[in-house]
Amino acid sequence: MADRSPRPVDVVVGQNVRIGRLQKGLSQTELGARIGVTFQQIQKYEKGTNRIGASRLQQIAEVLSLQVTTLFDGAPSAGHGPTEQTPRYLLAKPHALRLLTAFSKLNDEVSRLALLHLIESLSRIATRRRSRTRNGR
């Protein structure tokens, strides 16, 4: 029986579809309507659960105004899989692109630094909470 888990290249292509869709300001429903599939299918493509066929990949690239090859950016080469901390992986996380876009609009370096410190502090708190939960405290 074949392994049903997503392959690394399918995950990367899906992440790139999501990033391109968000950059274009499209919902999953809108992208799906433009290429003739449901939003659920777009969800599966973006998670890498379902592979994207060549003609569908071309349609997606056209709607997102991207080259097909762009959708493969960061794909693993022989023996090198993607890591979960690459910028591409992190950018595909919910709200990450919105956060980065808003951050880039801040012209005041003091505000940028204050926001960065706030986010880092929240991250440390969340990490400590997860650690305590795992350790049964």
Image (cartoon, grey):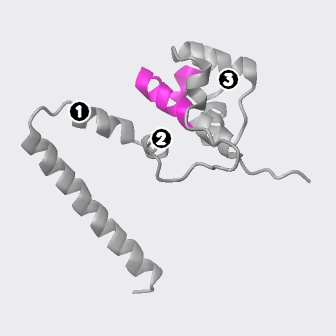
* Left/right of residue 111 with respect to residue 58 in the rendered view: left
The answer to whether residue 36 is seen in the rendering is no
Whichever of labels 3 and 1 marks the residue nearer the N terminus, that label is 3
Q: Choose top left, top right, bottom left or bottom right for residue 107.
A: top left
Magenta: predominant secondary structure element? helix
Spatial CA span between label 3 and label 1: 33 Å
Name the foreground residue: 59 vs 44. 59
In the rendered image, which residue does mark 2 sit on? Answer: 88
Q: Disc 1 marks which residue?
A: 104
Residue type, mark 3 in image: Val
Badge 3 is on which residue? 37
- The residue at 56%/21% (across/down) is 31
Q: Is-magenta flag for residue 30? A: yes
Residue at 55% x, 14% y is 63
Q: Check disc 1: other Cα within 10 Å, few if <14, some if 14-19, many if 20+.
A: few
- Taking the image as shown, residue 137 lies to the left or right of residue 106, namely right
Given the image, on which type of amino acid does mark 1 rest?
Ser
